[in-house]
Amino acid sequence: MLTRNPCIARLKSGYLFPEIARRRREFAAAHPDAKIISLGVGNTTEPVLPHINSGLVEGARRLGTAEGYSGYADEGFEELRRRISEVYYHGAFGVDEIFISDGAKCDIGRLQVLFGGSAKVAVQDPSYPVYVDGSVFAGAAGAGTDTGYQGITYLPCTADNGYFPNLARLPQNSLFYFCSPNNPTGATATRDQLEALVKAALRTGSIIVFDAAYSSYIRDSAIPTTIFAVDGADECAIEVNSFSKSAGFTGVRLGWTAVPKKLRFEGGESVLADWNRVCGTIFNGASNIAQRGGLAALDDEGRKELRALTDFYMENARLIRTAMQKHGVPCVGGDNSPYIWARFPGEDSWDVFSRILEKCHVVTTPGSGVGPAGRGCLRVSAFGHRADIEEGVRRLARLWDRG
Ligand code: PL4
């Protein structure tokens, strides 16, 4: 018999989102009449808008014609890669530096192959669980403890430091996962902060994996939507991004990774060349239908739809944040991001999660599930139908009115 992969055996718990779903199912089974509202997982709910949808339909139509048919498209349609470079990076990248993927999460997982089990990993704490759990799979983490995994550096991002880590604590030669707008806190890094981040990476010989999955939610024009807005980032950063939250492609699956030519390993080898090798070997490209949808999303009409869709969720975020502020619940986020991060000092996150589920029939995300610094906090997602958000907010307000 084969023995179990010891890296997987090291995992302290199951993946967070299925665990939340399990608790929801358990509650629903015990309370069959409860109308449960989910403000937990960040899953889009609104239909794909018409112009972008017509791109998807066109993609399917072409596949049924001799002249339009296409098979494997490994790194992605060149036209789409060029368009991404123009729209998101002012054309700074060549098509060979943009890799089309089936989503940001999938590339985050594959990126671990690039760095191997001996990489020193650093994360913002709290953070999207894939960075830590993926590092555990790759063998880059030691035993799990109450405060995380040995070998992973957790850089707290809390109210005390304005949700930006102390970069003096970034170890030499780290693989540093950084997400802005941040999941889960909803905080966004300013230009000055991103400049400090790049400086720290260059000083320590680290590589930043910059997760920009929520960049289309930034409304403040002073906040950079990409790490590559900062000089020097092309020597120390990789960026992952996605159509999931901007175009509602969570189920369609389309994203990309930008890997600058200038980015090198310690020995001078090209990171891009290795990424090409990894993707060419264990990934067979994103769906051609999805890529046609992506192209439609990035023309003039499509970009108006991206704005309309993200505006819709941002209004949800405003409703949630306003209700929290009115009831004196300390919170951050929801202004340039679709997540609101609420603090319940002295309480256990899972207890707050359970109380809200039991009393309001509303599902949230417990902060302790996304990192040790998330204890006593709760993430509330703005992804939902408007009527559900309004009803969820009414129920939460009633709970807080009662004290
Ligand atoms: C539940 C910072 C959501 N099953 O859709 P993708 O793969 O292009 O992007 C996923 C992703 C990447 N980066 C960040 C993210 O927050 C997400 C999506 N996160 C959430 O509620 O935190 C969905 C989670 C999904 C998952 O595990 O990703």
Image (tube, helix red, strand yellow):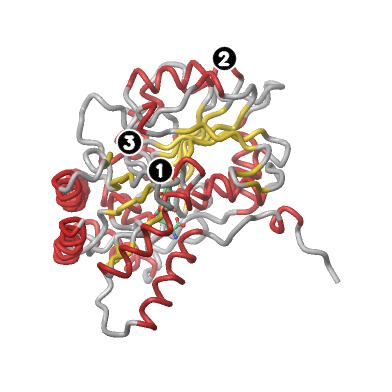
Q: Residue at x 62, y 45 (%)?
A: 135
Q: Secondary structure at mark 3?
A: loop
Q: Residue at x 42, y 43 (%)?
A: 78
Q: Earlier in the sequence, mark 1 or mark 3?
A: 3
Residue 43 in the image, given as x and y percentages of width and height:
34, 60
Name the foreground residue: 309 vs 144.
Answer: 144
Q: Which residue is mark 2?
A: 203
Q: Which residue is mark 1?
A: 241
> Mark 1 Cα within 10 Å, few/some/many (few <14, many 20+)?
many
Q: Secondary structure at mark 2?
A: helix
Q: Are marks 1 and 3 in contact (CB under 8 Å)?
A: no
Q: Taking the image as drawn, is residue 375 in sight?
A: yes
Decide if ligand 1 comes within 8 Å of the CB at mark 3: no
Q: CA distance from mark 1 to mark 2?
A: 25 Å
207 displayed left or right of 194: right
Q: Give amino acid for label 2.
A: Arg
Report the number of numbered marks: 3
